[in-house]
Image (spheres, rainbow, N blue to C red):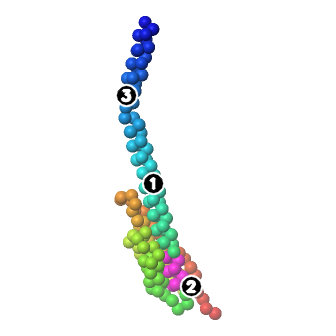
């Protein structure tokens, strides 16, 4: 009888091992998918950050050009686009630069969309900078 009991226990363990067959593969596949999603989201956030940084740099350049004595909103806008093309490249998609200037303040706004790392996701980017107009004498 003792011999039979041991055989029964071994049979149960053997049956339990068969029910776990493939579990490690499923677990690895699930973890791999989660890791890829995490890396993709991180890369998308980095792309958005790069686009926002470039937009901020371009808006600052546009505003600082337009604020100079004798300058204009058009000159600031042109400089903003020059900065976007040379420094930002394709990190900011469909960019627009808008510059307004009145007697006391220059406002430069750069808008666009961050490059898409995750298909279908292209976060918007909007940066606005306000600076005083340069006064002489």
Disc 1 vs disc 3: which is toward the camera?
A: 3
In terms of depth relative to the viewer, which is nearer, 68 or 9? 9
Q: Earlier in the sequence, mark 1 or mark 3?
A: 3
Is residue 96 on the magenta stretch?
no
Q: Residues within 10 Å of mark 2 (few under 14, many from 20)?
A: many
Q: Which mark is residue 76?
A: none
Residue at 39% across, 58% down:
118
Residues drawn in magenta? 58-66
Which is more foreground, mark 3 or mark 2? 3
Residue depicted at 39% across the width and 35% down the height: 23
Along the line of sight, the residue nearer the viewer: 110 or 45:
45
The location of residue 62, given as percent across then percent down, is 50, 80
Circle 2 residue: 133
* Dot label at residue 39: 1
Mark 3 = which residue?
19
Considering the numbered disc 3 on the image, is that residue within a helix, a strand or a loop?
helix
Q: CA distance from mark 1 to mark 2?
A: 44 Å
From the image, state whether disc 1 or disc 2 is nearer to you. 1
Picture layout, residue 11 above or below residue 120: above
Q: Image quarter for residue 105? A: bottom right
Q: Please state the horizontal and vertical placement of residue 90, each as a whole percent of the image.
A: 40, 71
């Amino acid at each position: 009888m003792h011999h039979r009991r041991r055989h029964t226990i071994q049979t149960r363990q053997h049956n339990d091992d068969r029910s776990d067959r493939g579990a490690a593969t499923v677990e690895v596949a699930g973890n791999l998918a989660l890791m890829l999603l995490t890396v993709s989201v991180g890369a998308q956030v980095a792309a958005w950050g790069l686009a926002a940084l470039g937009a901020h740099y371009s808006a600052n350049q546009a505003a600082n050009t337009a604020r100079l004595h004798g300058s204009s909103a058009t000159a600031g806008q042109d400089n903003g686009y020059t900065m976007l093309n040379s420094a930002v490249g394709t990190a900011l998609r469909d960019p627009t630069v808008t510059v307004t200037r009145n007697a006391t303040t220059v406002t430069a706004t750069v808008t666009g969309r961050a490059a898409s790392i995750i298909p279908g996701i292209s976060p918007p980017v909007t940066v606005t900078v306000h600076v005083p107009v340069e006064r002489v004498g």
